[in-house]
C-alpha cells in the first residue's frame, strides 16, 4: 500500500530567515491499499497536487513519511524502485508527450528501462489497447484532442507496468466528452491496478472505493462515497459541490424523510428508488 504517516510539507521561500513557511500539507494520515480505487477531492489550493508529488518521491515530507510497500521515500536506496511502482499522470498532457508519434511516445519509458525491442513493442501494443488508442499509433500527438492526448499520457505510464497509477487532476483540462472518455478508461483499469485519482470533479468520486477530502492542507473527511456525500451541505464549506443526483435525492428526502433507505449516487439508482 501507499501510506501517509503524519506528513507535513511546506515550500521554503528564498531570503527568508526561517526554513519553515506556511504549511501546504498538515498532518496527513491515510492509506491506499492495493486494488483500491481512491479519489481525493479538494478545491484549488487545498494541497492536492503537492500530495500527488509525494506518492513517488518527487517531493519529500518535511515531517512524517510516505511509505510505498514499506519503502520510505526519504531513503535514497528505494527511490527508483518506488518510481517504478508508482506512475504519475500530470494535469496537462502536453507536459508529458515528447515524441513525434503516439507509439514512440508510449515506448519512451520502456526504452529507458533498457528492455529488449520485442518486449517494448508488446508493452506499447498492450498499453494502447487498454486506453483504446491503438488506431492512433502512427498519429502525431499534437494532432490529437485533449482527451486523446491524456489517454496517450496514461498509456505511456501503463507501459512501465506500475503497480499504482496516480492521476493528478488528469481530467480537469478536458471538455465533458474528453472527461467522460478518460473516466471510462480509468474505470476499465481499476480492476487490474491500484488507482489514486485526484480531482475536484465530485461526480468522478461516486465510483471510488474510498473518498478523501482535503481542505487547507489537511484531510477533513474520509469514507465510502455514500458516507461522504451523506454529509450533504457540509461538503459545500470545503469548496465542493454535491453530485446532481445526490443533491436531488437529498432535496427529495428533506420533503419525504422515508423515501430512501440508501442514498442514491447514480441516476439509475435514483430512478429505481423512485419507481
Image (cartoon, rainbow, N blue to C red):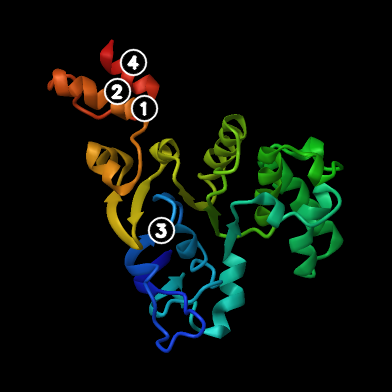
Residue ID for mark 3: 33
Q: Which of marks 3 and 2 is nearer the N terminus?
A: 3
Label 4 SS:
helix
Residue drawn at x 47%, y 51% is 198
Mark carried by residue 248: 2
Residue 259 appears in the figure: yes
State if disc 4 and disc 3 touch (CB < 8 Å).
Answer: no
Which quarter of the image is occupied by the C terminus?
A: top left
Q: What element carries label 2?
A: helix
Q: Which residue is drawn at 65% across and 50% down?
A: 154
* Alpha carbon distance from label 4 to label 1: 13 Å
Q: Distance between the residues labelled 3 and 1?
A: 29 Å
Secondary structure beneath dot 3 equals loop
- Mark nearest the camera among 4 and 1 is 1
- Write down the residue under mark 4: 271
Of the pair 36 and 23, the residue shown nearer to us:
23
Amino acid at each position: 500500500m501507499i501510506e501517509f504517516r503524519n506528513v507535513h510539507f511546506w515550500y521554503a521561500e528564498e531570503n527568508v530567515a526561517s526554513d519553515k513557511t506556511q504549511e501546504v500539507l498538515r498532518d496527513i494520515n491515510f492509506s491506499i491499499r492495493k486494488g483500491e480505487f481512491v479519489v481525493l477531492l479538494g478545491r484549488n489550493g487545498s494541497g492536492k497536487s503537492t500530495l500527488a508529488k509525494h506518492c513517488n518521491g518527487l517531493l519529500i515530507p518535511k515531517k512524517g513519511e510516505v511509505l510505498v510497500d514499506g519503502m520510505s521515500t526519504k531513503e535514497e536506496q528505494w527511490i527508483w524502485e518506488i518510481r517504478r511502482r508508482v506512475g504519475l499522470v500530470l494535469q496537462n498532457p502536453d507536459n508529458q508527450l515528447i515524441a513525434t508519434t503516439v507509439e514512440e511516445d508510449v515506448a519512451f519509458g520502456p526504452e529507458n528501462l533498457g528492455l529488449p525491442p520485442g518486449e517494448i513493442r508488446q508493452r506499447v501494443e498492450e498499453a494502447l489497447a487498454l486506453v483504446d488508442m491503438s488506431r492512433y499509433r502512427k498519429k502525431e500527438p499534437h494532432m490529437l484532442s485533449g482527451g486523446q492526448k491524456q489517454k496517450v499520457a496514461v498509456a505511456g505510464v501503463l507501459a512501465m507496468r506500475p503497480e499504482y497509477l496516480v492521476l493528478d487532476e488528469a481530467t480537469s483540462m478536458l471538455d465533458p466528452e474528453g472527461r467522460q472518455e478518460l473516466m471510462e478508461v480509468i474505470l476499465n483499469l481499476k480492476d487490474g491496478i491500484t488507482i489514486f485519482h485526484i480531482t475536484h470533479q465530485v461526480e468522478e468520486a461516486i465510483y471510488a472505493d474510498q473518498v478523501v477530502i482535503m481542505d487547507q492542507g489537511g484531510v477533513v473527511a474520509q469514507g465510502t462515497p455514500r458516507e461522504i456525500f451523506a454529509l450533504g451541505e457540509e461538503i459545500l464549506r470545503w469548496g465542493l459541490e454535491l453530485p446532481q443526483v445526490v443533491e436531488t435525492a437529498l432535496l427529495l428526502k428533506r420533503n419525504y424523510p422515508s423515501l430512501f433507505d440508501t442514498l442514491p449516487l447514480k441516476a439509475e439508482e435514483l430512478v429505481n428508488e423512485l419507481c
